[in-house]
Image (cartoon, rainbow, N blue to C red):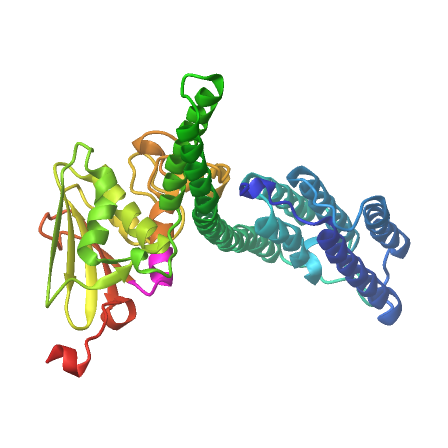
Amino acid sequence: MLTNVSAQRVRLDTLVRLRWLAIAGQLVAVCAVAFGFGYPLPIVACLGVIGLSALLNLYLWWGYPRSTRISDRRAAFILAFDQVQLASLLYLTGGLGNPFAVLLLAPVLISATILRLPTTVALGLLVSLLISALALWHMPLPWAAGQPPAFPLVYRLGVWAALLVAIGFICTYAWNVAHESRNLANALAAAELALEREQHLSELDGMAAAAAHELGTPLGTITVVAKEISREIDPATPLGEDIALIQAQAERCRTILGKLSSLGVNPDTVISTKTLDAILDDLVAPHRDFSVPITVTTQGDGPSPMMRANPALSYGIGNLIENAIDFASQEVCVKGTWDANAVTIRIEDDGPGFPAVVMARLGEPYVSRRRGRGDTSAEDLPALGSLTGSLRGDDVTGGLGGGLGLGFFIAKTLLERSGAEVKVGNGIGTLKGASVIVSFAREQIDLTPKLSVEESA
């Protein structure tokens, strides 16, 4: 099951290791200033603040298993503690005049990459308050013999403003990049799970067909023997009734096995290889009963090419057809064309077309042109038990206003993995609505048997 981003918890061991690195850096910096440069420094207080951070790390290190994944709230508490601890250390060593004040950005940056947006915003507000407090209250900056430099007010305000701007810019950028990466990973996982499900169904179909084939012979023998026995026994006797029942049940088993045999389709056989005309007719057939009529036309040089009706092609084209029906006003047109170099499938509708804001991002996960919801975030992604409906264009959240925007992404991904090139546009087709063009290289997809020189003559 695919869960949302809030449930993708960070490993405690990751935070603990990062905190050990920060503790070691703070300890080295304090000792270098106090003992290396000989600057006056409240060394005891500084080591005490660093010691508190080390004690928390030891508690986390020994109190929980290394593989523990902590909740969003606990991770936020640890990062908030780090902010307060670092601000306390900076208070003892010059406030914003200390060059290491920039390290206040680190906890918020970590939060932007691993935690939810509200948590990151809360930590950003906390560190902004700490920076503002350090700009007003702090102990003198450790310095050599004599008075430490007095920084002008304008400079201190500049540092304060620069840190606040850095928090907003860096964390916003980091969160957006991490969020996009998580969305892409979730969507790819959805596509892989849907394909895995289809593969399992195909395997079950094959097993059913094999079982039907193997059981056919003994069932035929039972039928023949029961028929021979029925000739020797009076049908009116109880034994005759039993024989008649055996024959009836054997015939019923034969019917069931016939249905099982029809389920299994070996993709390596000629059954899965059809003409482009037949494939388009099969893909459109489930949607014929909808209120929007669908027109299928095919045209090309020579006979219709033979293609393999694999799941990727079926799901990809089927999803595009269903999306066109969702947004069409009166008509949907599916056109298949071919020449010596390419096989092209064009899906058109007479609807409003793709909005400009969606057109720029089509092909990315969680982008939808359904009314009322242009971009669904990963936090709103439901369990993947419902996502197989999205693969076929179903609105798993209900109504036109709740599409996840995964349908086109998955369709495009499946088709491109099959070697297709997918293009979209508005007003480029006969119907002047949205158009999706799927093109395959003829030599890659055409399975038409090549005639020999003697046969062609």
Q: Which residue is drawn at 79% across and 52% down?
A: 92
- Looking at this view, is 126 or 221 the one in front? 221
Q: Residue at x 34, y 42 (%)?
A: 392
Magenta span includes 416: yes
The C terminus: image quadrant: bottom left
- Looking at this view, is 420 or 365 the one in front? 420
**Residue 254 image position (x, y, % from top left):** 39, 37
- The magenta segment is 412-420
Q: In which quarter of the image is residue 133?
A: top right
**Which SS type dominates the magenta stretch?**
helix
- Looking at this view, is 12 or 256 the one in front? 256
- Looking at this view, is 169 or 232 the one in front? 232
- Please state if 286 lies on the left or on the right of 98 as rendered: left
**Residue 56 image position (x, y, % from top left):** 82, 46
Can residue 450 be seen by looking at this rendering?
yes
Q: Residue at x 19, y 37 (%)?
A: 288
Can residue 121 be seen by looking at this rendering?
no
- Please state if 156 lies on the left or on the right of 12 as rendered: left
- Please state if 142 lies on the left or on the right of 4 as rendered: right
Magenta span includes 208: no
**Residue 71 image position (x, y, % from top left):** 67, 40
Q: Residue at x 85, y 47 (%)?
A: 52
The N terminus: image quadrant: top right
